[in-house]
Each structure stands twice: as structure tokens, then as C-alpha cells.
């Protein structure tokens, strides 16, 4: 079966003409801010609450779906468990979520 690239497929991952989308990626485990450059400058925040396993949130602009997949592969390579990926509108509203 051959995949056909449609206008909708091309637009995925951008919030306008050539504008990257803002993504929030939540993983289980610790990742300090020193990793930010390796994740193309995304902001990194660690959350530790009591006895629960720490979580790390990466948030920032992602150029396109290829770049997003690359970041997810990097998280996989670090053996971090993916909890969620959310695309966020420019005004801060959640656009879509995959929990």
C-alpha cells in the first residue's frame, strides 16, 4: 500500500506557515537542564513529589513531525518512559493530547 502525502499531512506539526508548534513532553525519570541543548533548546523541568517516581517535562517549539520523532527517539535511547505528548496552541490552550 502506498502512502499519499496530502496537504493535511504536510501541515501536521506546524501552527502556521513555517511556524513550529509548541510541545510538552512528559517522561518518567530524571533529566536535568544540562540536556536542553541535546533536545534542541527545549526547557526542562524536573518534578519530584514525595515518594512518587520523579517526572521530567520538556517544553518548547518543535520544527515538525520529523523533529518530534527524533526527540522521542532520544528519550527512548535514554531509557525514559514516555507518559504524554501534548501539542499546545500559541495562546497556551492544549490542541491535542496522547496519554
Image (cartoon, rainbow, N blue to C red):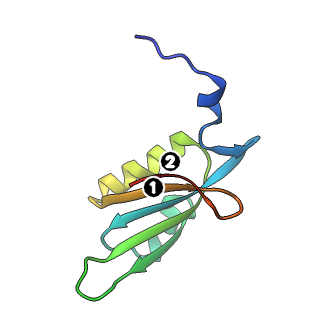
Nearer the observer: mark 1 or 2; the answer is 1
Residue at image position (30%, 61%) is 80
Quarter occupied by the N terminus: top left
Residue 85 in percent (x, y) is at 45, 55
Residue 26 in percent (x, y) is at 41, 64
Left/right of residue 6 with respect to residue 57 in the rendered view: right
Q: Earlier in the sequence, mark 1 or mark 2?
A: 2
Residue 53 in percent (x, y) is at 25, 76
Q: Is residue 92 above or below residue 87?
A: below
Mark sitting on residue 51:
none
Q: Secondary structure at mark 1?
A: strand
Left/right of residue 54 with respect to residue 24 in the rendered view: left
Q: Which residue is denoted by mark 1 in the rendering? A: 85
Density class for disc 1 (Cα within 10 Å; few <14, some 14-19, many ≥20) is many
Residue in front for this viewpoint, 71 or 90: 90
Residue at image position (41%, 51%) is 72
Q: Are marks 1 and 2 in contact (CB under 8 Å)?
A: yes
Q: Is residue 4 above or below residue 99?
A: above
Left/right of residue 24 with respect to residue 72 in the rendered view: right
Q: Secondary structure at mark 2?
A: helix
Residue at image position (50%, 47%) is 68
Residue 8 in percent (x, y) is at 63, 29
Residue at image position (65%, 64%) is 92
Density class for disc 2 (Cα within 10 Å; few <14, some 14-19, many ≥20) is some
Label count reads: 2
Q: Which residue appears farthest toward the right when viewing the image?
A: 17
Q: CA distance from mark 1 to mark 2?
A: 10 Å
Q: Is residue 54 above or below residue 81?
A: below
Q: Which residue is denoted by mark 2 in the rendering? A: 68
Amino acid at each position: 500500500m502506498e502512502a499519499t502525502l496530502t496537504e493535511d499531512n504536510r501541515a501536521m506539526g506546524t501552527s502556521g506557515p513555517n511556524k513550529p508548534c509548541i510541545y510538552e513532553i512528559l517522561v518518567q525519570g530524571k533529566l536535568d537542564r544540562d540536556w536542553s541543548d541535546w533536545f534542541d533548546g527545549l526547557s526542562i523541568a524536573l518534578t519530584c513529589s514525595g515518594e512518587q517516581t520523579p517526572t521530567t517535562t520538556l517544553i518548547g517549539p518543535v520544527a515538525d513531525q520529523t523533529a518530534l520523532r527524533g526527540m522521542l527517539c532520544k528519550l527512548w535511547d535514554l531509557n525514559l518512559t514516555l507518559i504524554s505528548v501534548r501539542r499546545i496552541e500559541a495562546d497556551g490552550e492544549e490542541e491535542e493530547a496522547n496519554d
